Every structure is written in C-alpha cells, then in structure tokens.
Amino acid sequence: MATNLTTIQKLILEFIIDKKVTDGMPPTLAEIASHFGYKTRTTVQQHLDAIEKKGFIKRNPKLSRGIELTLEDKYFTPKPVIGEVAAGNPLTIYPDAIDTIALPTIARIPADSFLLKVKGDSLKDAYIFTGDIIIVNPNITPKNSQFVVAVLDDAAVVKRFYKKSDRIELHSENPEFDVIIVEKNYTNFKIVGVVVGVYRSMEKKVG
Amino acid sequence: MATNLTTIQKLILEFIIDKKVTDGMPPTLAEIASHFGYKTRTTVQQHLDAIEKKGFIKRNPKLSRGIELTLEDKYFTPKPVIGEVAAGNPLTIYPDAIDTIALPTIARIPADSFLLKVKGDSLKDAYIFTGDIIIVNPNITPKNSQFVVAVLDDAAVVKRFYKKSDRIELHSENPEFDVIIVEKNYTNFKIVGVVVGVYRSMEKKVG
DNA sequence: CATTATACCGTACAAATGTACGGTATAATT
DNA sequence: AATTATACCGTACATTTGTACGGTATAATG
C-alpha cells in the first residue's frame, strides 16, 4: 500500500496504532497532543482530518476515542516489521519500513516489542521458518532457555540463551551446531531482545 | 475462579467484555447506562464500584473508557481458545471451560474467526506443532492450496484444500499420507473454516 | 430490629473531549 | 503572483465523562 501520508501524519497514525495495541483503545486528541508536545488539540484534530481524508482512519464524531483504523482488518492489528534476521548475517533493519503486517490480536504484542522477519532455514530446528515473523521484546531480561536475538561480531543469531556464572552460552536446537560461548568481557556482543512469539500467516501458500 | 457477582453485575461485565471484543474498547458509563436502560450513570457507577471491589475490573480514574479487565491475560485478548484439533480425532470444543466469565466471551466470539489449539504432531509437516494456536475463519471460501479445518466422518483434519471439478481433495504436507478424496455428493463432510494464521507463544519453554 | 448489600433515582460539578473559527508561517505547485 | 497543502498557534463552546452527595426501596443477615 503506497503511503501518501506525510512524516508527521505517519507518526501520529503509528502512535494511534501503538496505543490501540498496548492500551486496547485509541487515544484521545489530548493524549496525542501531549505525546507530540502540541499545545492545542486542534493541531491533532487537523492532522486527523488529513489522515482521515487520505483514508487511513475513520472517526465517529462526538464519540470519545472514536478513531477506527481503516487499514486494520477487523480482528488484526497492524504492526511494522522493522527488519530481518537471517542467522549468520548482519541484522537488517529496514530504513523506514511502514511494511506493516496484520498481526492477529491474539498475538497482542507489548508496545516495546518489534517484529522481525525470518530468512533462511537456520532456525528450522526451533520450528521457525523463512517468512515467519518473530516478536522480539528488547526490554526483557532473558531467562535461561529462552530464545534471544543477539548480535555477535556484527552477525545476527537467534538462539537459546543460557547464562553461566562466567559466560553466556548460545545453544542451537540442532545439536550439530556448536554451542557459542561468549565470555563475560567480550565486547562485540549484544542481546537485541527476547523472542516472545512467532507468527506465521497462512494466507499465502507456505509449501 | 468462583463468581460472587450478582446477576446484574455479571450482565454488566459481560457487556463490557462484549464491547471490548467488538468495538475494541470498553464502553463509557453512559453507553452502559443506555444499554441497560438506566436513567443515570450513577447506577452504572455503583455497579462498577461493586464489580471492581470484587476484583473483576480495575478502573483508571478520570480516564474515559478506563475499565480494565482483570481476568484478561496480558498478551491475549479476551478471545478464548475454543477447542482443540488433533488430526484424526473428533474436533473438540471446550464446553464452557473457564467459568461464567469466559462463557459469554465464547458465546460472543465474532462469527468471523476463532482459535483452536493444536494437539499432536500430525501437522508437523506443515510446521504446526502441539500447543500452537491456529486461527480459523469460517466465513472464507477456501482457495486451492489453503489449509482448512474440516470434519470428515466425525474426525477432524487440517489439510490443504484443492477443489476439482467433481470432488474435493485434501492433501497432507507429508507425501506419505494418502490424499483424501471427497466426492461431491458425500454428506458426512464439512469445511469448518480456513486456517488464516498460526500463533505460537515462546514465553514458556518450547523444547 | 438494626444493619448491610443490592438496585435504582435525581442533582450537581469539574475536567475531559470533540470540534469550530480564526490566525500565522513555510514550502510546493500552478 | 496566486493557490494549495502542511504544520502549528489560541480562544471558545456544547457535550461527554467520571464522580460525588443524597435519597428510596427491597431483600438478606446477624
């Protein structure tokens, strides 16, 4: 879907989506204004007018929080896929990807998490396949045996996390792969986040 | 969870859940009052006080539509998983699993889509595993190669759908399984719905 | 018999909410 | 040079919204 929304309009729309996902309901004009530092609700009002005119939302007049997302399939919440993981390769982050996918509401993801598309079959032993979307939360401290997205020497990996007293181990589901051991003082290593869910759309053919 | 809610309180709670599911957000006091024919919002206010006191909801003071459902699992909308598919077995629909509260939610699932939990590894060739949740839409006409949930001779199957001029074929991902052929006049066959998505939570350990 | 919980009513009010009207400033288009 | 779209401001106002206070009536409980 081509977006003829301006940058600011896009930001506002994203904020609305974000609020809907985390709070379960769209924000009020005042909440939007406050978030963007506007001194008047009128400014928001005018942006919403523009966004509505472009067909991205529909508003129920006089109804509080009456912003409906037009692009949203009734039971699906759109959320941008911000990048790709293909194990072994650098973590690709799309520049300004408004490549939203329709995530089912059951996969109700916390606002602070993001989506990555899986490429390659390096995760097939974890039952995660090319095209699957993984939901990554960067604000969770990983517990042992959880899947994490990590960047090690500029290459991305998705592996099970195990913390030992002196090091961190990254295990693969497939025993043929060696365990990656990260010593405590190793600097070129970063946990990107914890994988909290996997979603796969079946609409298009998989096989 | 035992319910010590009164009949009316229960009705009001159900209405709130219903509104949340259909409109995406909880109602205002006025909307509740109008639905139940109350002449005052105060009446609703008092019922909500009671319901909150009993721990079923939590309210954000002063915030419009600030009714939170306490019973709602953090990452899941009140949309319940209504049954189980274990290929070869009858389609299990949970009777009224989670006590009075979940029941109305179940009854009110938008006819549009529902959730089934997958049991057994009969679908592993389609990369769907035990514990996964499939999202099924009964109102879509299946296209060729889409996964469908079907009931054939009282046993549930989840297979790829292929319509031929004179029959319907149900294919398995695993070529070792025979293709099921349903002749056009066969009666004991019903397409339950099209599998539109698979969701797997990674929060608890998978392996 | 007094108390408590339930189930309603009305009146009142501050704050929140959506919206209208009018204005300024910049950039792009015609 | 005139117009249009964008991006803000301020003031104003009728409703909506949540909430408080006070009252009535019934049924159940101690």
Image (cartoon, coloured by chain):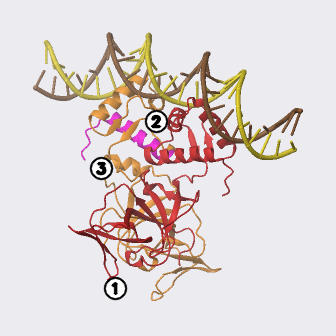
Chain colours: A red, B orange, C yellow, D brown
Mark 3: give few (<14), some (14-19) or many (20+) Cα within 10 Å.
Answer: few
Q: Is residue A195 visible?
A: no
The numbered mark, 3 or 2, whose residue comes first in the sequence reads 2
What residue is pinned by disc 3? Answer: B99
- Give the chain letter at badge 2: B
Q: Secondary structure at mark 2?
A: loop
Q: CA distance from mark 3 to mark 2?
A: 23 Å
- Give the chain letter at badge 1: A
Image coords of residue B141 (percent x, y): 59, 66
Mark 3 vs mark 2: same chain? yes
Pair 3/2: label in front: 2
Is residue B3 rendered magenta in the image? yes
Q: Is residue B20 visible?
A: yes
Is residue B180 rendered magenta in the image? no
Please give the range of residues in magenta. Answer: B1-22
Marks 1,3: beta carbons within 8 A: no
Mark 1 vs mark 2: same chain? no
Mark 1 vs mark 3: same chain? no
Pair 1/2: label in front: 1
Q: What amino acid is found at the position of numbered circle 3 in the picture?
A: Asp
Classify B44 as above or below A182: above
Mark 2: give few (<14), some (14-19) or many (20+) Cα within 10 Å.
Answer: many
Quarter containing the N terminus of chain A: bottom right
How many tags in the picture? Answer: 3
Give the residue displayed 38% in from the left and 40% down from the top. Answer: B68
Classify A99 as above or below A11: below
Q: What amino acid is found at the position of numbered circle 1 in the picture?
A: Glu
Pair 1/3: label in front: 1
Q: Secondary structure at mark 3?
A: helix
Image coords of residue A46 (percent x, y): 65, 35
For residue B27, which numbered disc appears in the image? 2
What residue is pinned by disc 1? Answer: A176
